[in-house]
Image (spheres, rainbow, N blue to C red):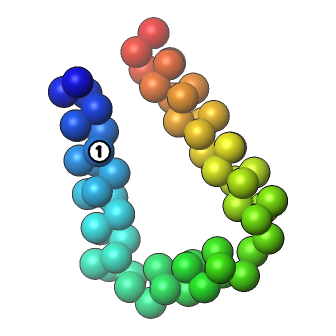
Amino acid sequence: MSDLVVALGLVLALEGTLYALAPGGMKSMMRSALEAPEQTLRMAGLFALALGVLLVWFVRG
């Protein structure tokens, strides 16, 4: 359970860093995401999911 909390903390720290350093870039990325087709977002999400699971698996294995 503590690993999950640490992972969520890291996600928040990374997201916060991006918003703090480049708020205009993040707004631009959000606009791009709103204009992108759902299928493109779904495939990007599945790719990120698979990459994240593989990364955790290799680090923990």
Q: Nearer the viewer, residue 9 or 61?
A: 9
Q: Which amino acid is tagged 1?
A: Leu
**Residue 55 image offset from top left, x and y in percent:** 51, 29
Image position of 43 (left or right of 26): right
Image position of 57 (left or right of 23): right
Picture quadrant of residue 47: top right
The single residue placed furthest to the front in the displayed view is 38
Q: Quadrant of the N terminus?
A: top left
Image height check: is 8 above or below 14?
Answer: above
Q: Which residue is mark 1?
A: 8
Please state the total of marks drawn on the protein image.
1
Image height check: is 15 above or below 22?
Answer: above
Q: Nearer the viewer, residue 54 or 37?
A: 37
Helix, strand or loop at mark 1: helix
Picture quadrant of residue 28: bottom right
The single residue placed furthest to the left in the displayed view is 2
Image height check: is 13 above or below 55?
Answer: below
